[in-house]
Amino acid sequence: MAEKGRALVGKLDLKRPMVRAGYLIMMILLVVVALATLFPLLWVFISSVKSSVEIFQVPPSIWPQEFNWSSYANVWSKFNFLHYFGNTVVFILGIWIIQMLVITLAAYSLSKLKPPGHQLIMFGFLAALMVPGLAMMVPKYVILQDLPLFGWNLLDSYWAFWLPAGANAFNILLLKTFFDGIPDDLIDAATIDGATEMRTFWQILLPLSKPILATLTIFIFLGAWNNFMWPYIVISTTEKQPLMVAIYDSVFKSAVFAQNDIMAAITIAIIPPIVVFFVLQKYITQGITLTGIKG
């Protein structure tokens, strides 16, 4: 009977004392790392159900003396979560559409069409990864303030997010590597059957690329959701702000909300990316393996 799955360590290996001890130590280390990663999220949630006095208690208490859920009702009634959540959805959806359109076509060109100078283009993408994102903020701000050729001022608009996010060097290289794993025989067969380049791209490569596209969707979503500095710089109208910036501007800096209200607002804000991650997490392993065809 064929094995249904493959474990990290075989059953026969686990019978050896040294292997079993090493496996146990590795599991303990993984649990410790997982707890260290989850601790900030748990601390935010626990703080949200404490009283404001208990939050600043010295020494701090790990567990609340009494669960105070009123902070959630208070911050929800005084802060328009749905409006700013809608702003964030528009903000992320625009970035996802533009970036997917650009990176899929760019990766397909570099992987399968190989235009003249494609190696130099690849070097340019690799060089772009070495430039810190903060170093690009001032040039981007100046360009968006007076868009070349058109003279448009795109600041305080969603185009200030969408256009700079269109070409992501890391995502292009990751997708290009994935496309490299798809046999050229499929492309040649489609060409012999009379398929155009766009039809080959749309009906062959993209259906085979669902795992990596789901992985990139997670990267794009989390990157856009956690992006605070750039929206805070370019958006001056409060009604246009995404959720994280609005929480900082209208909740964190406000004297109306107590400390536990702030923690409750942050807890509500981190729920959507966690949900998206768990919905799409099964694709992450498939995407990282960078295999285009099963069999």
Image (cartoon, rainbow, N blue to C red):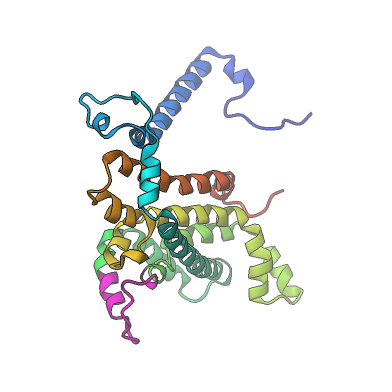
In depth, the one of 198 and 230 nearer the eye is 230
In depth, the one of 236 and 218 nearer the eye is 236
Magenta segment: does it hold 133? no
Q: In which quarter of the image is residue 1?
A: top right
Q: How many labels does the image show?
A: 0
Magenta segment: does it hold 144? yes
- Residue drawn 41% across the image and 54% down it: 81
In-image side of 202 versus 36 (left or right): right
Range of the magenta residues?
139-160
Q: Quadrant of residue 64?
A: top left
Can see residue 57?
yes
Give percent across and percent down for residue 165. Answer: 41, 66
- Residue drawn 24% across the image and 51% down it: 254
- Residue 175's place in the image compared with 106, above or below, is above
Give percent across and percent down for residue 110. Answer: 52, 68
**Residue sitting farthest toward the left:** 58
- Residue drawn 42% across the image and 45% down it: 268
In-image side of 168 versus 59 (left or right): right
Give percent across and percent down for residue 167. Answer: 43, 67
In-image side of 23 versus 156 (left or right): right
**Residue sitting farthest toward the right:** 1
- Residue 44's place in the image compared with 241, above or below, is above
Can see residue 184?
no
**Residue sitting farthest toward the top:** 17
- Residue drawn 57% across the image and 46% down it: 279
